[in-house]
Structure formats: structure tokens, C-alpha cells
Image (cartoon, rainbow, N blue to C red):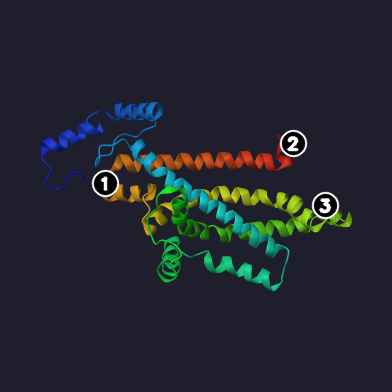
Amino acid sequence: MILGEYATDESIAALRHTLGLDLSLWEQFVRFVRTLFTQGDTGHSIVSDVSVRQLISDRAPVTLLLIAMAAVLAVFVSLILAVAAATNKDKLIDHLIRIFPAITLGMPVFWVGLLLILLFGVRLHWFPVGGVREGWAGMLYSLTLPAITVAFSQIPTLVRSLRAQMLEVLESDFVVTLRAAAIPRRVILFKHVLRNSALPTLMLLGVNLSYMIGGTLVVEQVFGIKGIGSLLFTSISSRDFPVIQGIALYCAVAVVVIGLLVEIFAWWLDPRTKEKR
């Protein structure tokens, strides 16, 4: 499949030797594990003959920056909407914010990206429709619209979760006691209510970040960003299996690391968890 339908026996044998397919399964596995742990690599690209680690490291900064921007934006917007909804329960603003997740939750991320390109790129000319400009300022400007697209897919679930947790905490006994002690409303809300409501939403954010990685790879294709996503799709179309394998492996490691960091932050955030441990 890699060499095409009319490949010669010599080229097939050479490719098998390059990929290590002429070795036994056990030897292939040992070779793969040794290279992975000693070099952090999964081999060389069949197409470009460049190490997979080098290909991924060249594309990773753009993708990581996009994920970070989307995560910060999603948390910031979700926090504002959830606080507004919880502090205005059953009022008009609460109903409007509750309708937002119901409408937007099922929207495909690539479709949202296309709509944003048409509106803010083609119509209003506020943002570039694709590519990444040079320099940090140009990079941040170019990634703003893609970051909004990725964040848009995560905001509905975060808003719904944080609002529900805040309403539960607002009705708890210790909040009633704080109000009776004439503690300022802003202090109660931001120091006590948000802190006690954040843990379940934080755990949800950790799960959503894993999905955000996959969404980012798709959004990169929509906006023509040369990140890990475009590398993955190019490798799939050219059947560059070592690169595909490397991207899948690094994404899996990223998911595990994110989960570990979320657990550590949750342990720091919740005093009850500290006491148990």
C-alpha cells in the first residue's frame, strides 16, 4: 500500500528492512520500546525520512498554544456565564444562559469554525481566515479565531456543571451562616462559593481537555494551521504509519499528564481531600 500497486520486489524488501518488518515480532517490539524510552522517538517518517520526534516537535508549539488559548478562554467565559446564571436564578438572564448549552452542545466544531470564518474573516475582516503569522503577536492574533472555535465546543458543559454546583453551594448551611454574619456578598461568592463549586467542574475540565486535543487537530485543518493536526492528516493520506503512531502516542501521554495535573490541583483545592490523605 505504501509503495503503490506496481512496486518491485526489491523496493518492497528494502522498505521491510527500513521498517524492521524483516525481524521477528519480539525483536520489533524490543526495538520499538528501546528507541521509545532512550530517544523518545517512534522511528522515522517513511515520506520525508525525518525522525518522528523532530516532526512533532516542529509542529507542537502552535498546537500547544492553541490548546492553551482555548482552555483559558473556555474557563473565563464559562466562569462569567455560570456566575451570572447562578446569582440570577430563574430570571431572564438565567434562562438565556441555560438555553445556550442546549442549542450549541451538538454543533460540530468544524461547522462552528466555518461559520466564524465566514462572519469574522470574510464578512468583517477582523481575523485572518487561515494560516499563522510570524512573531508572538501575529501568532496570538492568528490563533484567536481557532481558539474561540475550540473553546466554543467546551463552554456549554462547563457552564452547566459550574452553575449546578454553585446553586447547590449557595443553598448550603455555611453560606447562610456567612450571610447572617454580614460577610460581603462578593467575598461569599468568590472566596467561598466558587472555591467549593470548582472541584467537580475542574474534573470535568480535565476530561474536556482530552477531547479538546482531538478538536484542535480538526480545527487546524479548517483554518489551515500547520500544527500536529495537519501533520496527522497528511500522514494518514500518505500512509506514513510511524508518524501516525507517534502522534497517537504523544496525544495519549498528554491525556495522562493532564489527568495527573488535574488530580494534583484538585488535591490542593479541596481541603477535605487533604485531610483524608
N-terminal of the two: label 2 or label 3? 3
**Residues packed near mark 3 inside 10 Å, few (<14), some (14 to 19) or many (20 plus):** few
Instruction: Indicate the secondary structure of the residue bearing disc 3.
Output: helix
Mark sitting on residue 86: none
Q: Nearer the viewer, residue 125 or 255?
A: 125
The residue tagged 2 is 275
N-terminal of the two: label 1 or label 2? 1
124 in relation to 63, above or below? below
Instruction: Say whether residue 91 is left or right of residue 257.
Output: right
Q: Position of residue 121 (x, y in %)?
A: 42, 66
**Residues packed near mark 2 inside 10 Å, few (<14), some (14 to 19) or many (20 plus):** few
Q: CA distance from mark 1 to mark 2?
A: 52 Å
Q: Residue at x 62, y 38 (%)?
A: 264
Q: Position of residue 178 (x, y in %)?
A: 84, 53
The residue tagged 1 is 239
Q: Residue at x 42, y 56 (%)?
A: 219
Instruction: Indicate the secondary structure of the residue bearing disc 2.
Output: helix
**Residues packed near mark 1 inside 10 Å, few (<14), some (14 to 19) or many (20 plus):** some
Furthest-right residue in view? 181
Q: CA distance from mark 1 to mark 3?
A: 60 Å
Q: Residue at x 34, y 43 (%)?
A: 244
N-terminal of the two: label 1 or label 3? 3
Q: Nearer the viewer, residue 72 or 167?
A: 72
What count of labels does the image hold?
A: 3
Q: CA distance from mark 2 to mark 3?
A: 19 Å
194 in relation to 105, above or below? above
Instruction: Indicate the secondary structure of the residue bearing disc 1.
Output: loop
4 in relation to 142, above or below? above
Furthest-bottom residue in view? 92
Q: Amino acid at mark 3?
A: Phe
Mark sitting on residue 174: 3
Q: Amino acid at mark 2?
A: Glu
